[in-house]
Each structure stands twice: as structure tokens, then as C-alpha cells.
Amino acid sequence: MRPLPRSFYTRSTLLVAKELLGKRIIRTDGKQIVSGIIVETEAYLHNDPASHSFNGPTQRNSAMFGPGGHLYVYFTYGMHYCANVVTGPKGMGEAVLIRAVEPTEGIEWMMQRRFTDRTDSTLDQKRHIALTNGPAKFAQAFGLTTEHSGLDLLNSEIIITNGNALARGSIVASTRIGITKAAEKRWRFFVKGNAWVSRR
DNA sequence: AAGGCGATTGCCT
DNA sequence: GGCAATCGCCTTT
């Protein structure tokens, strides 16, 4: 599968946040391949008090100000990473947080990274969902850290391709999770009924 | 140089 | 449902 073109990403961030649902994100790292279908996203805009870019470029958020189609990964709460897709033209400072994916390939690798009790190789329904049903869980399952921030989604070990076509009416919009500023904006989008969505 | 805090998660009650 | 864990970044002295 070919990576989505640059033109996919350099459009309206709210549009890209919705259209990323159903797409496939793939990390190919040496012998490892892990992939999943994106089922939950959040948009962060340039004039958005909840966005890391709101106060302008800094060392931490610099990838957000690059051209669309790159990755922005940040570290938070002293222990978690979260991964974003940069959107819009260079200098814009907008991105889409990937909040959840449905695992499709490399589940064994995801289990190794996510679960400390690695001797327990069982994967019941609960553990299966817990692999990637949250932004930091997804980042951990895929092994994404700040070292991957700035990677080009058109030409790197991480790409996004066409995935599943979504049925009409299957996208739900809601308020974003875990923020205090601009909390009323309904800029979170998810696939209705998907088991990997972090919250209902 | 110091302090507050966060786009979260998992464990405990 | 409540809360601790844990630390880099940014703002303020």
C-alpha cells in the first residue's frame, strides 16, 4: 500500500481528523510490522487554547509547525507519549491526536510493549482492547517516542495508507478528552460502536 | 534557579 | 469514581 499523499494532510485539520478514521497506520521497523485502523482522533488548531501550538513554536512543539504529513510526538505526565499527525501548511501549527486504533498486525509486538507480565501470553477480549484504546496506549503499543517526532509519514518507518471504508453516518463528534481550555469544542471524532474507542 | 502542571493510565475503594 | 505516579517543558523570579 502507498502512503497517503501530502495533499491529504495539508487541508483543514477538522476535515483531516475525520478522514483519518478508517485509515491504516503502519510501523515497519526491521523485522517488525505493526499496524492498526485509526478509530478515534482529536483536532488541535492554531488558534486553539488547548493546543500545544497556541503560544507559538517552542523546542517541544516544533514538529507541529512543520508541513502536514509529519509526526509530532510529545511526552507527558512523566511517563506517557502521545502521537499526532501534523496537518495544514508549514508554519500553521495544527495537528490531529491519534487517540485509538484497532490492532490489525503485529499484535505479539504490541503485547510485549504494553504488558509487563510478558510471561502471560493469553489475549482475552479485555487485554486485546487494552492494547490500543487510548493515545498513550497506542503510542506504547507501536513503540512511538519523541525520537519519532518529525518523521515524514510519506517516507519513513511510519506511514498511513487507505484502510477501511466507513459506512455513512458512522462518525461521531464529541468534546475532547482531558483538557480544561476550549473544553466545549466538539473536535473529537470516533467510529461509532468500535470497541477500541477510549470513551463513550 | 525554582515551581507548577499536563491532549494519561492503572490501581484502589 | 478518586487519585498517585513521574518528569520535561515552560513560565516566572
Image (cartoon, coloured by chain):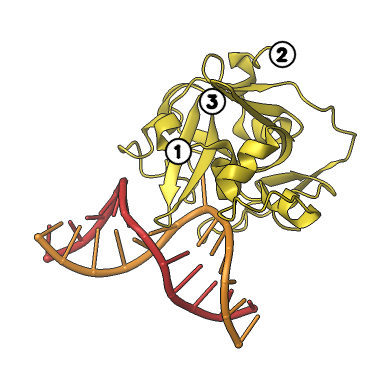
Chain colours: A yellow, B orange, C red
**x and y percentages locating residue A173 in the rendered image:** 74, 48
Do marks 1 and 3 share a chain?
A: yes
Task: Give the quadrant of the N terminus of chain A.
Answer: top right
Q: Is residue A197 something that shows in the picture?
A: no
At 88% across and 40% down in the image, what residue appears? Answer: A169
Q: In the image shown, does A93 or A6 lie closer to the viewer?
A: A6
Number of the label disc, if any, that sits on residue A137: none
Left or right: A94 as drawn, with respect to A196: left
Between the residue at mark 1 and the residue at mark 3, the CA separation in whole angstroms equals: 23 Å
Number of the label disc, if any, that sits on residue A145: 1
User: Dot 2 lies on which element?
Assistant: loop
Kindly check if marks 1 and 3 are in contact, taking CB atoms under 8 A apart as contact. no
Amino acid beneath label 3 = Gly
Number of the label disc, if any, that sits on residue A88: 3
User: Viewer-nearest of labels 3 and 2?
Assistant: 2
Q: Chain of mark 3?
A: A
